[in-house]
Image (cartoon, helix red, strand yellow):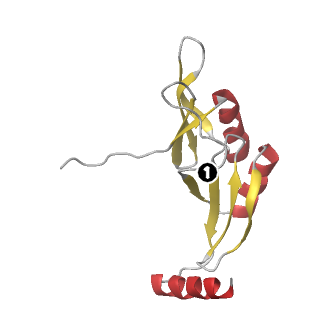
Amino acid sequence: MTDILDLYPRLVVDDGDGACAFYAAALGAETIERYTDPDGRIVHAMLRAGPIRFAVKDADGYDPAPATGGVSVIMALYVSDADAVADRMVAAGATVVFPVADQPYGERGGRLSDPYGHLWMIAQQTERLTPEQIQTRTDAMYEQA
């Protein structure tokens, strides 16, 4: 058995430079690595925002950008102030899917779509709950729906 040493998401986008600029403005991300092909398209850009890392690459024949509509991954970003981060993301060009609000599972959070089709769940912990408490509140939420 081998040890897992690292895992980071890699976001495929139609405009790598634009995406790096968006994540810098929206999340304060810094590009710490950037490699391009002979045509100048980003084949790998590693970004750091606080303690997290994620990569961006331009779409190509091997890795097409996500189709408009459904997604296969939602980025979950835990922060100290969900409202402030969501506001920064919207100011930088993101759109609100679900507004930031208090959630029954002990978090304040919402969901945004970045200009490149990726969904971001922005959340902050507001209460420490047991799994049983979260399930009880989740059951109540679905009963009201």
Disc 1 marks a residue whose amino acid type is: Gly
Local SS, label 1: loop
Horizontally, residue 145 falls left or right of residue 33, namely right
The residue lying furthest to the top in this view is 38
Side (left or right) of 8 relative to 70: left
Given the current orientation, which residue lies at the most extreme right position?
A: 91
Residue shown at 72% from the left, 42% from the top: 115
Is 9 placed left or right of 94 in the picture? left
**What residue sits 32% from the left and 46% below the top?**
5
- 57 or 14: nearer the eye? 14
Circle count = 1
Q: Position of residue 95 (x, y in %)?
A: 77, 51
> Which of 15/106 is in front?
15
The residue under label 1 is 70
Residue displayed at 59% across by 12% down: 39
Q: Is residue 32 above or below residue 136?
A: above
How far across and down, in percent of the image, does residue 86 sit?
Answer: 74, 56
